[in-house]
Amino acid sequence: MEHPPLTQTRSAQSFVGQRMFGDYVIQKVLGQGGMGSVYLARHTSIDQSVAIKVLHPSSAEDIELVKRFNREAKAIARLSHPNIIRVFLFGHTEDDLVYLVIEYVEGLSLRQLLEREKSIPELRAIYIVKQVLAALCEAHHLGIIHRDLKPDNILLTEYRGNTDFVKVVDFGIAKVQEPEGVAQEKLTQAGVVYGTPEYLSPEQAQAKEVDGRADLYSVGVILWEMVTGVVPFDGPTAMSILIQHVYDPPPDPARFNPSLSEGMIAVLSRAMEKEPDKRYQTADEFLAALVDLERRLRQEQLEKGELLYDSSTKTEVWLPSLVGRTSNRYLQIEQGNNRKTIIESGGGSAPPLRKTRRTGKAIVRQAIVSAIVVGLLLLVAIVIALAYLITQG
């Protein structure tokens, strides 16, 4: 089937069914904004789905917007981390449409997950944020500062059975450090604040020069929201929120989630220090802190020896039986009917869970039931013996 070439003379919806670059056919509109539209397209030869971002013709006349588009393509092209979206093509069509072809990620954003679930259990939140920090480890090492990290720019997709596999997106206002000797191109104006107010670092709020520690503050805010269900700073205007980032200490997260561990509260406090020198200094350091906290939280769970029910294998298991199977996994646990249920587990293959012995309340209940059964059997035996004696007498 022949598809007409893409032109800029129609609405975004009318582009559906048209062809770009000879091989990509646009299938549907994924989203539209003030700057442009995002389309789902499929390569007709190799059956590969991609996302194509196209600037509106009016936006394409804005030199700064085009430079930002180019900056995003340039930043992502430098990166090859599995937790960062991949870029395939960037350029202009014959009709002067500016486009960016990137990896298509099927799933939901962290923002959508938070809207659906309000807050996220600590271990699951740690699992997600560890991947964000792993992506930042590479980006910062290559001199790329994201500067607009927020739940909307963290996508969760399925990969090898893991439904919480992270993809960091939208490097449109990233700061890219050029190699030594190459002139630095400034896209942001002095004294102008760029980004999303709820997640900006104090130095960004003051339009100061930033480094990777600004991203780490934003990650701290994201983690704060994940485990409490609210952002630490909010207000009626962007300026009121920025002022709080600069001057106000974050509220106690335990006010919003009394079950938070002391370790999590300590991590949040360090990540959201006002002074960059008091925060985690690198993404690696922040990541190491979360790995240590994850280990301690798991150990606490193991020591409790709580009985869990695996809904996939329909078996009750000792949590200690999961040792060695969960180092790169998370468990999402649901309480109900006086037992806890593993309703989701991420990543990798593992031997099937097996029924094991119970302890604590479960053993007490089992002992009581056993005693009652034995007592009833003894009573029946006594009745039979008495009946026998009476018949013989």
Image: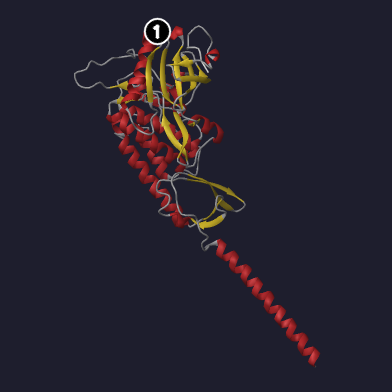
Give the residue at the far bottom of this rendering. Answer: 393
**Residue 366 locus on image (x, y percent):** 59, 66
Q: Which structural element holds mark 1?
A: loop
Side (left or right) of 97 relative to 144: right
Give the residue at the far front of this rendering. Answer: 1
Quarter in which the C terminus is drawn: bottom right
Q: Amino acid at mark 1?
A: Asp
**Residue 328 locus on image (x, y percent):** 40, 46
Q: At x 45% / y 7%, what residue is drawn?
A: 58
Task: Say if residue 222 shows up in the picture.
Answer: yes
Mark 1 residue crowding within 10 angstroms, few (<14) / some (14–19) / many (20+): few
Count of numbered tags: 1
> Is 95 placed above or below 349 here?
above
Residue 151 versus residue 23: which sits nearer the camera?
Answer: 23
> Is 88 placed above or below 302 here?
above
Task: Say if residue 205 shows up in the picture.
Answer: no
> Is 239 placed above or below 319 here?
above
**Residue 156 locus on image (x, y percent):** 47, 33
Residue under numbered circle 1: 62
**Residue 237 locus on image (x, y percent):** 48, 18
Residue 341 versus residue 17: which sits nearer the camera?
Answer: 17
Q: At x 72% / y 78%, what residue is drawn?
A: 380
Colouring convention used in this rendered image of the protein: secondary structure
> Is 201 placed above or below 7 here?
below
For residue 165, what is the image quadrant?
top left
